[in-house]
Image (tube, rainbow, N blue to C red):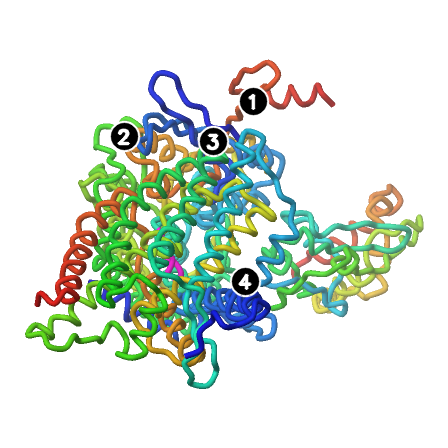
Amino acid sequence: MEGLKVGRKNRSFVVPIGPYHPTLKEAEYFKIEVEGERIIDADIKVGYTHRGIENIAMHRTYWRDIFLFERVCGICSGVHTNTFCQTVEELVGIEIPERAKYLRTILLELERIHSHLLWFGVGLHIIGFDTLFMHVWRDREIVQDILEMLTGNRVNYAYNKFGGVRRDLSPTLAKGINEKLDLVDKALKTLFQELTSDPLIFARVKDIGILDKNTAKKYCVAGPTARASSVAIDVRKDDPYDAYDKIDWSVSVYDSCDVLARVLVRYEELVEAVKIIRQAIKDLPEGPISVEFDDFPEGIATSRCEAPRGELFYYIKSNGTNIPERVKVRTPSYVNIPSVKPMLIDETIADMPIILASVDPCFSCTDRVTIVDIRKNRKYTVTFEELEQKFRRKR
Amino acid sequence: MQIIDTQTLLEVILNILVYPGLLFAFIMGSLFWWEFRKLRARFQSRVGPPWYQTFADLIKLFAKETIIPAISNKFLFVFAPILALASALVVLWLLPIPVSILPAISIFNLSFYGDLILVIYLLAMIEAAEILAGFSSSSPYGVIGSSRKVNLVIAYELPFALATIAVAFHVSSLRLSDIFTYQILNGPFILDVPTGSSFAFLAPIFHLITFIVFIMCILPKLRIKPFDMPEAECEIIAGPLTEYSGRLLGLFELTHVLKWFIIPALTVILFFGGDLTIVTFLIKCALVVLLFTFLEVINPRYRIDQGYKFYFKYILPLAIIAFIGETAFALGVI
Amino acid sequence: MKGKTIVEVIKALKAPATTKYPFVKLPPPEKFRGKPEFDPEKCIGCGGCVQLCPSGALSLEDKDDVRIITLFYGKCTFCARCEEICPEEGIKLTQEYELASYTTEDEIIIIKHELLKCKNCGKPFMPVAQFNRGLERIRDLLKDKGISEDEIRKQLELCPDCRRTVKNIPYGRKILVRMMMHE
């Protein structure tokens, strides 16, 4: 770790946040240059959790890749499989049955609830409110129980397959889910009352981390980060998939552009998600839950879904065999994390963790690595191919 | 009344080191810290640690490797925890604690005239030692943590001194054992109503204000929210103590354990006194710890500038009001 | 000011949200995806699960005249694809999730099937259980078409190479025509 380096001109020094830091859930490097408590510059380097998933996907069959892409991210694993299956279904040219669409919607909204409740807990922990953190995560367990009843596991649901879903929803299970959703409703109301009755929380999140509308559009942010800066984009409304165009729900947009707006956007999404699930269970049509198909034709297909963090985009190139030629994943955190830099300038270092957490970073998608050559005293960024060549030569 | 001066030197040393001195304070401090952690966990729907957790933590720390960073100022780095522990020990030996199990007026005290000022000074010295620790480690986290602590200490030490001296003015003595015996004779300070005054009903209000100011000012000393920003782990890992490990960290944590006995004891001695047995004394200390836990559990953490403003905008005026009120009562003006 | 928080905090004192696992075990819900287990009576050794397993936890080896199917829990992702594809309910996911152990050997499950030897060249090519189960499934069909079991066995007990020899093809074609003929 670097020691105390005092700049000559402006008495600034560098605080390294990461790669190992208690505030980060995964390893990333934020080089913050501060003057006293005020941040004057920030440098973000990602690439510490690069696992080479796209390369692995190119060597395995499509069916095996569903379970590979489930594990790109633990919090939003359902939406990754959903987008992958949607892309392949578009490639093959089939339409999944109506019942499967509704079931996929139920799963995606459940995942949104659990992801946002997780985010609430993490955000509250960062501002120091451990009590609410524990209480929110205790109430999140109800949602995890619902997911376990529906799919057989709390994470990595293995629910989607090409052509539909793998498990059905029986009426007793639907009743059980509705009962647990009542508990979730109560917990959400309590959370809102607790959040709004505390002036200390407002003091920590109001007018912090401003990202105005033009900067947001310039950085192409997605998801709640964009909707909190009055950029009204939501893939579920702009490009409907599954059953979102048949269910009555609304997009929440705020225009105060600060961390408080992002908190409120996510809270409203939580309430909407419970509404969507209840409606979907009520309107669930009868019928099969999957269709069969034969082959994977040659071609290119793209598809996108609204992950809890924003727009998730998949691209598949097929050469006619049952092994994909290229799969490209563009996750929403990849565009949200660089937008932290304009938010950080001129804020205090005490606000840095909550600003970073307010974009809900999920450091699970990377593609570059920085090499720091201590002997030659230089730093440079390489692509994966150069990295491969460099280390192959050494062996 | 048994006066300590007539005891033999051996008995004095035994009192200092075992009961109610070092060993007793260490055990009770660990148990109070455990009470804090357990209650906090239960308020948060968790189970919490077992009763021996603090002992286990300290034993583990003293068994680990001590690493001193190469870029630090090595002398100050090692000196800071020793300074903290020495200050805490002196404060501990100055506190008057009722030692008998059955009701009897028998207190342990080595206090002398003016020792209240020394207690205030040494409690601040413990914080100064942590500030020294942060700066000497010369890591960015330590420096930021220490600068935050400096801000905070500037903000709360003045109201703390005002509140403590207000109590002393009421009792008309700057000696801790006098405060203690005054409350044995007249009941706890917080309910004390001065006689022969037409504004006697105002006295409990001033006592309450003094108590609130005192409580608000000792929360940062015990790292209790909303005032634990120097140790905010989410931003600066562990604040001033980031670079400490092994035995040096063990010394700091030992000081913290002693603080968890000293500060509830000081609160009880100043405000809730009138104890004749050690049992009631400890029960009152446990209730004070319960109050601290409750304050921690319902609050998030202030940012350093917000905390600084809070102390100067709200607590310092209250402290001045309480001080003026108490002196007015004490001097017989009203 | 913090009324709701204080109420919630005091309500939480009633009981912690956690259970004293492992002294108190919580039963998982129905159809929870726990560890897969072979059913030796029903498994026919077809190897369908091995083809599908996304992580390679199931592997297959034909050694001498024995087919060994190995299941390694260390690689299993509990996706239930093997259960989905198995035609005979030979592998099922149970509700057990406590799989930790001190040795790797505990995590390896092996099922062995005797292989049927070709009547012509003697090469083992198919598990006996698969062969018998296959015959059982087409028993009614054979009865309808009037083909006796000995006749079909003469064809089926040859390995794929020997079935396609010039010597055997006429016999095979005859059986096939009789099976495909409509009444």
Q: Which label belongs to residue C135?
A: none
Tag count in the figure?
A: 4
| Residue under label 1 | A371
- Residue depicted at 83% across the width and 47% down the height: C163
Is label 2 in a helix, a strand or a loop? loop
First in residue order: circle 1 vs circle 2: 2
Q: Could you say where residue A10 lies in the image, as x and y percent from the top left? A: 33, 20
| Residue under label 3 | A46
Which stretch did the figure color magenta?
Answer: A128-134
| Residue under label 4 | B54
First in residue order: circle 2 vs circle 3: 3
Q: Are marks 4 and 2 in contact (CB under 8 Å)?
A: no
Is label 1 in a helix, a strand or a loop? strand
| Residue under label 2 | A346
Mark 2 to mark 3: distance in Å?
22 Å
Mark 4 to mark 2: distance in Å?
41 Å
Q: Disc 2 or disc 3, which is closer to the eye?
A: 2
